[in-house]
Amino acid sequence: MGAGRQRHGSVSNYAANLGNPISVDAGRRRSSVIPAAAVAATQKDGVLNQKDDTLRKMSVAVPNLAELSADAKAAAQLEHKLGLRKGIKLYPKAMFFSWGISLAVIMEGYDTYLLGNFFGLQTFNRKYGHFTGDVDGVPHYEISASWQSALSTGTAAAQIIGLFINGIVSERIGYRWTMIVSLLLITCTIFLTFFAVNIQMLLAGYVLSGLPWGVFQTLTTTYAAEVCPVSLRAYLTTYVNLCWVIGQLLAAGVLKGFVGDSSQWAYRIPYAIQWIWPLPIAAIAFFAPESPWWLVRHGKLDQARAALLRLTNAKANAEFNVEDTLAMMIHTNEMEIQQTSGTSYLDCFKGVDLRRTEVTCFTWLIQQTSGSPMIGWATYFMLQAGLSDSDAFSLGVGASAMGFAGTVGSWLLMPHFGRRTLYLWGQVVMFVVLMVIGILGVPSQSIGVSWGSGASILILTFVYDFTVGPVCYSLVAELPSTRLRIKTVVLSRNLYNIFGIIIGIIQPRFMNPTALDWKGKTAFFWGGLNACGIVWTYFRLPEPKGLTYGTSDTCRIDVQMLTYPQPNSIFFSRTEFPLANSGRSRSIHGDLITWSSFPKRMLPATSTTRRNSSRIFAREMCDSKLSYLTSCQ
């Protein structure tokens, strides 16, 4: 029997201890262990002050916690030894299925790019807009700022609804079937946009399309985060952003090809191209295994084991054991059960998960406030800046190509720089570029100024997709707890979409010649919001690089922003470890003994009397990125 299939007893014993494995999660409740503070005598200096009793509760809730934790430790250590090359060899099928399901984001990036840049296509404006006068002797048509806002905000509002539905439905029926149903729905809604006879019908098509787009936005990221190890997580989650950029690049190329076409097919064929994607993506989703984390949360341990075996190539690494990986997932799930009482949206705002929700939400919001609306409306902006239709759409293709190069280039930086570092400095550089665009918008239009503005948009696009754009997807996938990940990501994306509604209202008025007509000066507004994002990132964004999900639950590593440690203290989750003044590690009798890897000593959690029963020890290792428990006789 290969290493990947060799069974350890911890998972089987865990299921047996809890009764019917099918109801493992449904019947789980938080342990009712009395807090240590309620039963302990006066603690001396150098003794653990157990503010959070998660580990104590786990020791009661899971009878075989010691052996389960030992196997979980082995899996976590293997994950951290896996480099990129070994990770690819061990998880090739996980990469393929994540790659295939993430292709759904191409449709959203494609269609949203079409909408923003169709406003600069005279054939589209003639069909759905109104006559505004002659420009150089040529009749000119424009869709009013109000209808531009309605199309943008209607889509964003529908995405919010779709996201909330996704958070509930995907947790009930699984990621695969939620994706398949959403692909079926988008196939139907494309008919409305393709055959739209007026702007009202076009709006209905976009609103209904927003529902499955909301699913694509988060389900792809969550699935990628849950089927891959730490060494691949950054690449597969940021690949979702690359799919968005690919969609924009395809749309820019298609629009460029039809810029000289005056027939209705100049805008109908771009809509029809979207029918290419749903069937092959649905086929991949149908044959893909369900997320093993989702299966563990629902107590389907045998199916989780089978999913892990389908996602991996056990022969590629003799150290890999599927039972260890499954034990790590169970251990993390049990830890989070003791930390939070449920998996509802309300639980995202309780305890330490409130902090996770704040960080995740603001991280995704910064994608909007950093200046990305100038990128999304790039072609329309360049037309208003004075470039010809052909030049503007050519630069639109160039901007999308720069975005593609930037996202791929970000993969080279992520192994060497932290997520927080890239996110912070990306915003700083974008601020500088936005100021340049704003300054170029002050003087009267000229050929040189127009091309300077266009070149600045290309630089802004590259910097955004080199840093903020892709790194955001990695951060929002890594920061939430596993039990609340889908709902935390949904909340964060909905905040993104709510601000998208605001952008849909104000951006057309900033740039439309029939409204404020700010042109390049619009960049000053986004530069101001970008500066606010820089301040928040500097003071509040933690660094999750290299952490397993179990570690992010228990370890405040460099999470200088999750709580600020007091002098001479180390913080793990909500547990404080005052450093001892002297002495080597030694055995101390007690209910719970915690060994911190930094102080290198063992300190009793309580000073209760010695007991004859086996004692549980907790060893929280920040360096090895795992908190585990072992039993001593």
Image (tube, rainbow, N blue to C red):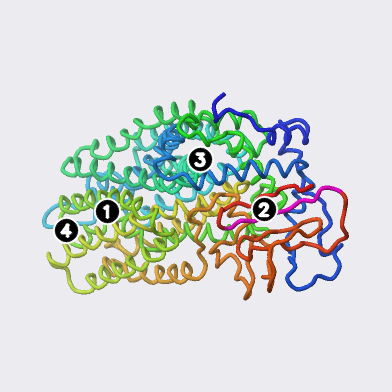
Left or right of 370 in this view: 543: right
Mark 3 Cα shell of 10 Å, populated few (<14), some (14-19), many (≥20): many
Instruction: Classify mark 4: residues with Cα within 10 Å, few (<14), some (14-19) or many (20+).
Output: many
Q: Is residue 46 above or below residue 152?
A: below
Q: In the rendered image, which residue does mark 1 sit on?
A: 142
Q: Earlier in the sequence, mark 3 or mark 1?
A: 1
Vertical comparison of 92 with 632: above or below: above
Q: Dot 2: few (<14), some (14–19), or many (≥20) neighbours within 10 Å?
A: some
Lower sequence index among marks 4 and 2: 2
- The Cα–Cα distance between marks 2 and 1, rounded to whole angstroms, is 47 Å
Question: What's the amino acid at mark 2?
Answer: Asp
The x and y percentages for residue 526 are 37, 67
State the residue at coordinates (44%, 37%).
98
Q: Which residue is mark 4?
A: 387
Residue position marked by numbered label 2 in the rendering: 347
User: x, y (%) of residue 12?
Assistant: 70, 32
Q: Which mark is residue 523?
A: none
In front here: 55 or 114? 55
Which of label 4 and label 1 is nearer to you?
4
Residue at 25 percent of width and 73 percent of height = 439
